[in-house]
Amino acid sequence: MPSSIRLALTLAAALLATAACNAKASPATGPVPAPAQDAPRASAPGRQTAVVSGGCFWGIQAVFQHVKGVISATSGYSGGSAKTAEYEIVSTGETGHAESVQIVYDPSQITYGELLRVFFSVAHDPTQLNRQGPDEGTQYRSSIFYSTDEQKRIAEAYIAQLDKAKVFPHPIVTQVVPLQAFYPAEAYHQNYATLHPNQPYIVFNDAPKVEHLRQGFPDLYTGK
């Protein structure tokens, strides 16, 4: 959806529910447990990549930019073709793309499973289908785009673990699908939450996610 409409919806929601700023993105009934199956912590520094989607990429990017061991987090598009990887086209909800974030991380400092724990705990609501907060459409769906068999195994096992434990009041709808390609979004979308901290959408929807990361994962939070 265009930024102007997104902003208007956010302001309307804020007037109807002043508590929105303090609401969790995740509806978990308690702490989200660590994954029972995970990749081992690497013995030497390196670079690995994860791609996830779950609502507006501004908030997902903002969260992972504050996670220890994350080298970079880039907003972009996954799920569609290169020719439709443009914001105004993706916003129609008809391209197959999801607003996604590519996370480059050091596996000697954080594991893939730990990244997914943050994803499910504070970055978004994995029980909402094709929407997050004021944003609605398939481009806001919850997805994990795996690039290796190990990532697929860990993601599917973790979702099954959380559903079995009834960590959330409703079933997780997150898709686990192969990553075909990731296309970086336009420059004005990058680091949006950091560059526009007083923008109402960021204040009401994204800043609380970063704060919940700081409170819930002090061992992983970095103030960078």
Image (tube, rainbow, N blue to C red):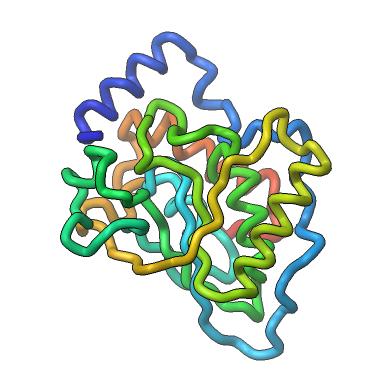
Which percent across, then down, holds residue 101? Answer: 41, 58
- Taking the spot 54% from the left edge, 45% from the top edge, the residue there is 123
The answer to which of 160 and 18 lies nearer the viewer is 160
Q: Relative to 157, is 179 on the left or the right?
A: left
Q: Quadrant of residue 203?
A: top left
Q: Residue furthest bottom?
A: 44
Task: Relative to 20, say whether 71 is above or below.
Answer: below
- Taking the spot 79% from the left edge, 36% from the top edge, the residue there is 166
- Taking the spot 76% from the left edge, 59% from the top edge, the residue there is 35
Q: Quadrant of residue 24?
A: top right
Q: Relative to 26, is 157 on the left or the right?
A: right
Q: Relative to 165, is 212 on the left or the right?
A: left
Which percent across, then down, holds residue 167? Answer: 77, 38
Which percent across, then down, holds residue 113? Answer: 68, 64
Q: Relative to 144, is 102 on the left or the right?
A: left
The answer to which of 85 and 47 lies nearer the viewer is 85
Q: Quadrant of residue 126?
A: top right
The answer to which of 152 and 27 lies nearer the viewer is 152
Can residue 214 be seen at all in this image of the molecule? yes
The answer to which of 184 and 66 lies nearer the viewer is 184
Can residue 224 be seen at all in this image of the molecule? no
Which percent across, then down, holds residue 198? Answer: 33, 35
- Taking the spot 60% from the left edge, 74% from the top edge, the residue there is 149
Quadrant location of the N terminus in the rendered image: top left
Task: Relative to 24, say whether 197 is above or below.
Answer: below
